[in-house]
Structure formats: structure tokens, C-alpha cells
């Protein structure tokens, strides 16, 4: 059927189509479909390069603002900077990606990349990459109210310098901020650098997405329906995507049941009636099918077996039907129902009978599907509200669903099925947390899937949980998830604290750095062995993000200076970095493994505080052994690279300087002991050089002692009589 109002899109290749679907799922916090949803994260968060397939997907679904050509024109000249000052959930990120994609298409740039702002208030010009013909995207971090860290109010006045640096290498920059923040930081910025934007209408957004995902879908028919127009009136982009999601489900359901129902696209009375039925299903789904579910549950003769089967089928979307049947029986047992679903014999209703009761069907792949769009999600939300006293048992069953094999089911779940099911379960818990500000489902999953065996079945579920929670928490609009992570950090429960630490080491930590560091500190106070191990892994992971290094090290060294029980976590965080070698050179300390001399010098200035913490550890302890190994690593680096030697020796010298914090003498003695041991180790051919560099350090320490003693003697009052 023709579509006169909207131009037909070329059919998408499989990868682009999966990316388009992944974009929609990410926006709706709905990761239940069997697609490579991780591709979306890999193309954006996990790499600085914004890869071409991802930009192609964005172009396919992007609805251009009314003044889109004007915005693009502002980026054509080398050195151009465009500020998109738009509130969250207004399509600003998609707009930025689309502009970068157009620059690539026109050959004005050769690559699009993201820039990390970092955890400090300033964005120094030196952080601009020394590459040519690039288009950069910089997202300004949200102002952190809880820690009073904000983007510098001088940011706008420094944009001119950024322009000059960008122009020198034929680069462009797009900056994302929101109106309140831009009003605060825009003083001194170039004139009209943040133009007003007239976004595309919800109808245009909906049409583009429908065209991309289902080219054969008659968009003029759907968008011409009065009921759909009402749903889209003044809708935000995410609201429009929810309507897209439901229309796609209704359309695909109609195609599956084409032998049972008239073709809704046919221009006949039967076709028009069928289309009206589908439209009404979308409207009902936007209201979570509440009225229809109430009618279904209140029907005379409705049994607990039927209710439990409906609930299990809604949760286990995509699982083999036998597995759903067995899990429904397990759910009945979990609820301790008087009438349980028996999986043996023919006492209980079978799959076909139950499917007919719950309005479901069996797909060609042997899985359960519902023809009503959004019906399965609505079932879950209805149960949660309707059965508050059954939530605890339900959550226990929910966490087991992707892990346990039901022996009654001959068809077990494949690993990819388990992970897809875990995605669906976690996305339900995330949506419940974001929409209703209730943490119970997420907390239950974190506690049930908490494990130290990353290769185990439970460990994979844990990885899915961390990936999706981190991606969701990285969004600026996810303020409740930020509160949830803070509460988990303070909970004293290692399972929840490990979840916080893992999330802080991923997307959330890269985007909301200061918030993440504060939660790391909370989660390790008081210290727990498992939690501390997770902390050490996370700080090393965060260190790989170059833009975060100085903020991370400054936070950790400040943490080391705390005088309460939290100091132990700071020591472990610094020890994890100081004792590690660089990834490419095992003789180079990780903290010094940088080609940027300015960054390396800044690192060195912060080291003494951390060294003091390491040298405070009691002799014979595991921490003292690690401190000894760290000193050996750094002294070897000083021996190998004469250019680094002065900085390394100076940082150690300052850590044990007389007149410093209490315990300087003990720290100095331990340092001498460690360095003497190092000087006698290793290849005999280098022993004299080792002893020589130890002599340099020892001489520096002696000079400090002599200077301090002389100063003290000068301060003493004279004993001579006047």
C-alpha cells in the first residue's frame, strides 16, 4: 500500500536494524528483545570513536529540527563550536550524532569522537586530541549538587581558545548542556554560539522510526488515526518512542495472525474494523491494559494456576514453552498455592489450554508470544501493584528464573537465552525503579546474583545486571538511580556494595565521575574483604580513562588523608594503582605510564600523600609486603629512566620528610629497609647502579634530617646567663 506522506526508506541491513532497535530499547529501558543490544553501548560509551554503523543507524531514524540546516551550517567552517543547550529527554544527543554524521557524509571530517570532560570543574584546552579533521562531541557533566562540584563558570569565556585550537587542526566541536547550566556558564562565550532549536514534531519522530524498522508499515494510516494523534500530542521523544514500540508490536502481531484476522491494510470494511481494533490496542497498552487485566482477573472461575502461568509467560518472554510451563509450576510452589500446577500427567491444564486462557500463542520457534502490544509488561506491573504481599516470593522466583534448570522441561535454556531473559528481568526492575522510585526488584536481583565466580552462570547474570544498571545510571535523567546507588553504598551489605563498585567502574563512573567516587568511598567504609577487592579492580579500570586520571588520583590521595575508618579504603585504592605496572611495559609504574609530560608532573605532585599511607602499614602484614613491592617497582623505574629518577626520589623523600604527619620516623625506616632490600636484589651487573641510586635517596633523606635538626637547635633558647 502506498504512503504519500512519507518517503520510503531503503531497507536496512541486519546490523543497522539491530542498532536502530537497540537505540529504541536503550531509550525505553527495555532490553528484552533477542538482539545485540550491547552494540549500542559499544558504539558510544565503550569507545571514544563514534563508529560509522552507529551513525548510520542514527541518520536512519533522525527527524531533523525545523532549523536543522542552520545548525549544520554553523559547523561547516574549521574551528566551529556549536552549543546545544537543551533539556534532557529532548533529543539533543540524537541531534548531535546526526550533525556529526552529516559532517562525515560531506567529507568535512574523517572521524567522529567523544571527549570526556573529566571529574574537575575545568576542561583544559590541552585535553583536545592532537588529531586532524575530526568532529568532537563534549557532554558537560550535570552540576553535582551533593558534592558542590560544578562546571566552571568561566567555561563560556574559554570557548574562544577552544575554537582557535580546533581551527589549527581543521576540527569541529559540539557541546551538550542544558539551559540552566548554560545560563550559569555562558558569560564571555562567542555571540550566538547556542542558538535556539525548534525540534521535530512527535509525529515526525514517530514516522522516521516506523519507516526505519518496518518499511512496509502504512505510516500514513497509523499517524492519521485520531487516537494515535492524541497519544502523540505534545509528547516527548521517549513518549513518541513508546508509541512506536506499541505500533510495531501491534503491526507484527497482526502479520503473525493474518490467517485469523482480516488484513488491516485493506481498504475494506473488514480491514478498517481490524485497523480500529489495533489502534485501540495501542491506546489500551499506553494505559497498561489496566481495565482489561482487571476484567480478566475478575472473571468467574479464574484460577491461581492461570494467573501464575500468565505471570510466568510474561516474564519468560523468548523462553521455550516447556521451560515456561515448568517455571509456572515453580511459581505456584513458591506462592504455596493450595492448587498447584502439576507438570506430570494430565491433572492440571496443559500449555494449549492455558495459552488460550491468557490470550497467548506459540511462535514457530516454540516460544510464547502475545498478540496484544505491551501485554506482558502490563501483566508484570499489574501484579506488582495488585499483590504487594506476594512481592518477596515473586522476586525470589524471578531471580532464579534465568539460572535454574527445571528438570521437568526437556528443553533447557541456552546461555544466550538466559542472558536475554536476564536483560528482560533487569529492564523490568530498572523501569520500576525509575518510574516508581522503588528499589526492591533491583536489590533482590543484586543480592541473588552476587557471586565472585565471574565465569559461572550466576556470574553472567551479574554482568548483565551491572552493564544495564550502569548504562541506565549514566543518563542525566536517572537521578533516582543515583540515590539508589548511594543508599546501596551505605547499606553495609557486600552484595549491594559490590554492585555499586562495579557500576562506578563502568559507564556511570565515566559520565558522573564525582558521584561515582563518592559512592566508592561510601561502599568501602567500613572495609569488607570482597568489597575491597572489587574496589581495587575498579580504580584500575577508571585509570584507563585518561581524562579521569587527575580527578581520580586527587580524590584517592585526599581519601588517604582521612583520619577515620574510611582511610583504609583510600589506602587500598592507592595501593592498587601504585603497585601496578603499565599495560605495555612491566617495568613502568601504571601511575607514570603516560606520554603527556604535564599529566605525569601533576601525578607526581600528588604521590607523597599516597606513599605515606603505604609506608604506614605494619611490618609483616600483607599490606606492608605490597608496599615493599611497590617501592621496588618505582625504584626500578628510576634506575631504568634517568629522566624519571628525580621525580620518583622526590615523591618518596616528601612522603617521609621530618615535620610531616605523625610517624615520619617509622615511615623513613621502612622506606630505607625496602630500598636496601631492592638494591641487593636482581642482576649482579646492575647491583652497583642500584646501590648508587639508593645512595642518592639516602643522601636526600639525610639532608632533610640534618636540616630539620639544625632548625630545631636554632629554635632552642640559649642556656647562657645574661
Image (cartoon, rainbow, N blue to C red):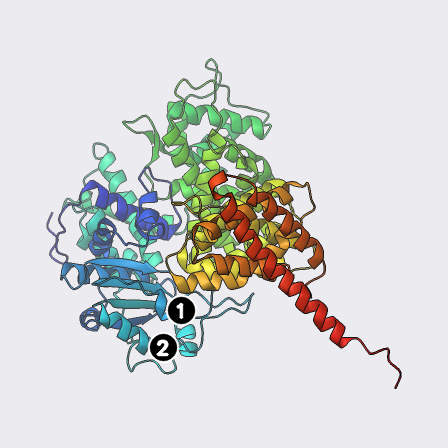
**Residue at 69% in and 62% down:** 661
Front position in the image: 147 or 352: 147
Contact flag, marks 2 and 1 (Cβ < 8 Å): yes
Q: Residue furthest bottom?
A: 722
Residue under label 2, please give it: 158
Q: Residues within 10 Å of mark 2 (few under 14, many from 20)?
A: some
Q: Quadrant of residue 608?
A: bottom right
Badge count: 2
Q: Residue at x 71, y 73 (%)?
A: 711
Residue 672, above or below 453: below
Give percent across and percent down for residue 514.
51, 61
To which residue does mark 1 refer? Answer: 123
N-terminal-most mark, 2 or 1? 1
Q: Which quadrant would residue 423 be assigned to in this image? A: top left
Q: Nearer the viewer, residue 459 or 405?
A: 459
Q: Residue 36 in the image: state x and y as whole percent.
A: 31, 40
As drawn, the residue found furthest toward the right would be 721
Q: Is residue 622 left or right of residue 643?
A: right
Identify which residue, 693 or 345, lies in the foreground. Answer: 693
Where is residue 437 shown, x and y percent of the image? Answer: 53, 54
- Looking at the rendered structure, the secondary structure element under dot 2 is helix
Q: Is residue 87 above or below residue 399?
A: below
User: Residue at coordinates 23% horizontally, 61% vertically from top-left?
Assistant: 100
Q: Quadrant of the C terminus?
A: bottom right
- Identify whether 310 is placed above or below 196: above
Amino acid at each position: 500500500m502506498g504512503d504519500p506522506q512519507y518517503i520510503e526508506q531503503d531497507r536496512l541491513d541486519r546490523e543497522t536494524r539491530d542498532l536502530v532497535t537497540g537505540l529504541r530499547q536503550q531509550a525505553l529501558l527495555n532490553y528484552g528483545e533477542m538482539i545485540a543490544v550491547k552494540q549500542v553501548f559499544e558504539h558510544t560509551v565503550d569507545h571514544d570513536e563514534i563508529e560509522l554503523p552507529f551513525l548510520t543507524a542514527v541518520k536512519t531514524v533522525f527527524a531533523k529540527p525545523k532549523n536543522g540546516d542552520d545548525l549544520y551550517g554553523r559547523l561547516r567552517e574549521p574551528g566551529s563550536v556549536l552549543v546545544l543547550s537543551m533539556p534532557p529527554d529532548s533529543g539533543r544527543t540524537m541531534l548531535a550524532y546526526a550533525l556529526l554524521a552529516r559532517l562525515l557524509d560531506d567529507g568535512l571530517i574523517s572521524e567522529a569522537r567523544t571527549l570526556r570532560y573529566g571529574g574537575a570543574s575545568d576542561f583544559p584546552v590541552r585535553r583536545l586530541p592532537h588529531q586532524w579533521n575530526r568532529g568532537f562531541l563534549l557532554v558537560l557533566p550535570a552540576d553535582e549538587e551533593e558534592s558542590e562540584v560544578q562546571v566552571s563558570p568561566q567555561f563560556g569565556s574559554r570557548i574562544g581558545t577552544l575554537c582557535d585550537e580546533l581551527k589549527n587542526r581543521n576540527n569541529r566541536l559540539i557541546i551538550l548542556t542544558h539551559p540552566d547550566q548554560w545560563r550559569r556558564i555562558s558569560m564571555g562565550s562567542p555571540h550566538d554560539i547556542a542558538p535556539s532549536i525548534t525540534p521535530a514534531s512527535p509525529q515526525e519522530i514517530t514516522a522516521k522510526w516506523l519507516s526505519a524498522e518496518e518499511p512496509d508499515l502504512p505510516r500514513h494510516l497509523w499517524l492519521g488515526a485520531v487516537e494515535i494523534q492524541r497519544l502523540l500530542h505534545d509528547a516527548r521523544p521517549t513518549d513518541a518512542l513508546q508509541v512506536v514500540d506499541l505500533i510495531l508490536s501491534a503491526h507484527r502481531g497482526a502479520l503473525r495472525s493474518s490467517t485469523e484476522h482480516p488484513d488491516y491494510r485493506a481498504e475494506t470494511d473488514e480491514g478498517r474494523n481490524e485497523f480500529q481494533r489495533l489502534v485501540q490496542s495501542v491506546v489500551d497498552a499506553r494505559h497498561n491494559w489496566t481495565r482489561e487485566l482487571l476484567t480478566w482477573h475478575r472473571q468467574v472461575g479464574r484460577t491461581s494456576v492461570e494467573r501464575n502461568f500468565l505471570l510466568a509467560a510474561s516474564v519468560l518472554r523468548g523462553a521455550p514453552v516447556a521451560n515456561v510451563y515448568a517455571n509456572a509450576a515453580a511459581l505456584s510452589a513458591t506462592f504455596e498455592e493450595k492448587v498447584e500446577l502439576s507438570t506430570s500427567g494430565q491433572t492440571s491444564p496443559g500449555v494449549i489450554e492455558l495459552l488460550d486462557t491468557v490470550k497467548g500463542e506459540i511462535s514457530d520457534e516454540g516460544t510464547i508470544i502475545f498478540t496484544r502490544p505491551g501485554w506482558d509488561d502490563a501483566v508484570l506491573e499489574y501484579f506488582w501493584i495488585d499483590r504487594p504481599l506476594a512481592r518477596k516470593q515473586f522476586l525470589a522466583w524471578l531471580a532464579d528464573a534465568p539460572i535454574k534448570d527445571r528438570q521437568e522441561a526437556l528443553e533447557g535454556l541456552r546461555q544466550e537465552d538466559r542472558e536475554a531473559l536476564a536483560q528482560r528481568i533487569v529492564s523490568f526492575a530498572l523501569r520500576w525503579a525509575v518510574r516508581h522510585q522503588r528499589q526492591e526488584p533491583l536489590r533482590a536481583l543484586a543480592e541473588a546474583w552476587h557471586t565472585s565466580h565471574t565465569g559461572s552462570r550466576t556470574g553472567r547474570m551479574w554482568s548483565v545486571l551491572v552493564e544495564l544498571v550502569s548504562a541506565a545510571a549514566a543518563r542525566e535523567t536517572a537521578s533516582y538511580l543515583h540515590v539508589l546507588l548511594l543508599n546501596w553504598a551505605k547499606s553495609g551489605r557486600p552484595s549491594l556494595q559490590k554492585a555499586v563498585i562495579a557500576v562506578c567502574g563502568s559507564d556511570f563512573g565515566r559520565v558522573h565521575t564525582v558521584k561515582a567516587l563518592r559512592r566508592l568511598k561510601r561502599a568501602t567504609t567500613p572495609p569488607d574483604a570482597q568489597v575491597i577487592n572489587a574496589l581495587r579492580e575498579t580504580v584500575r579500570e577508571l585509570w584507563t580513562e585518561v581524562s579521569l586520571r587527575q580527578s581520580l588520583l586527587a580524590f584517592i590521595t585526599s581519601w588517604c588523608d582521612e583520619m577515620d575508618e574510611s582511610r583504609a579504603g583510600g589506602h587500598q585504592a592507592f595501593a592498587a594503582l601504585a603497585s601496578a605496572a603499565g599495560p605495555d611495559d612491566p617495568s613502568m609504574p601504571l601511575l607514570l605510564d603516560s606520554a603527556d609530560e604535564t599529566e605525569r608532573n601533576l601525578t607526581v605532585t600528588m604521590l607523597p600523600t599516597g606513599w605515606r599511607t603505604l609506608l604506614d602499614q605494619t611490618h609483616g602484614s600483607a599490606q606492608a609486603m605490597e608496599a615493599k613491592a611497590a617501592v621496588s617497582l618505582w625504584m626500578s623505574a628510576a634506575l631504568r629512566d634517568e629522566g624519571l629518577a628525580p621525580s620518583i626520589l622526590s615523591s618518596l623523600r616528601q612522603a617521609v620528610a621530618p615535620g610531616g604527619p605523625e610517624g615520619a620516623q617509622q615511615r623513613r625506616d621502612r622506606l630505607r629497609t625496602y630500598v636496601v632490600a631492592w638494591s641487593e636484589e636482581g642482576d649482579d651487573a646492575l647491583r652497583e647502579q642500584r646501590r648508587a641510586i639508593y645512595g642518592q635517596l639516602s643522601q636526600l633523606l639525610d639532608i632533610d634530617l640534618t636540616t630539620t635538626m639544625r632548625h630545631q637547635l636554632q629554635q632552642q633558647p640559649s642556656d647562657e646567663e645574661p
